[in-house]
Image (cartoon, rainbow, N blue to C red):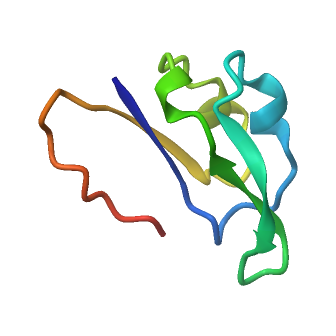
Amino acid sequence: MFEVKVKKDKCKGCKLCIDVCPNSVLDISDDFNKLGYHYAVVKNMENCNGCKRCVIICPDVAIEIYFKREGEDENRSNS
């Protein structure tokens, strides 16, 4: 299983990650970040196959993907 984290205050809402994701894991938020952008959010984490296309295409290095073992701690920081 994979865990996708979006650093919302780094995201400029370019939507490249949304367009490149083959499994519709990400979407754009209705809220604004501290820079005034609508940022990417995880909407279907269970669909993530860990391809890292979103990580590679993100110009702001705002997305991270972790491999998560069953029963592993879910407390990773959301910056």
Residue 45 located left or right of residue 37? left
- Occupied quadrant, residue 34: bottom right
The quadrant the N terminus occupies is top left
**Residue at 67% from the left image edge and 19% from the top image edge:** 23
Residue 73 located left or right of residue 40? left
**Residue at 71% from the left image edge and 15% from the top image edge:** 22
Residue 48 lies, in percent from the top left, at 52, 23
**Residue at 39% from the left image edge and 28% from the top image edge:** 2
**Residue at 65% from the left image edge and 52% from the top image edge:** 41
Residue 78 lies, in percent from the top left, at 44, 65
Residue that extends furthest to the left in the rendered view of this protein: 71
Compared with residue 42, is residue 51 higher up or lower down, i.e. above or below?
above
Residue 71 lies, in percent from the top left, at 12, 35
Q: Nearer the viewer, residue 58 or 30?
A: 30
Compared with residue 23, is residue 40 higher up or lower down, i.e. above or below?
below
Residue 7 lies, in percent from the top left, at 56, 61
- Occupied quadrant, residue 10: bottom right
Compared with residue 35, is residue 49 higher up or lower down, i.e. above or below?
above
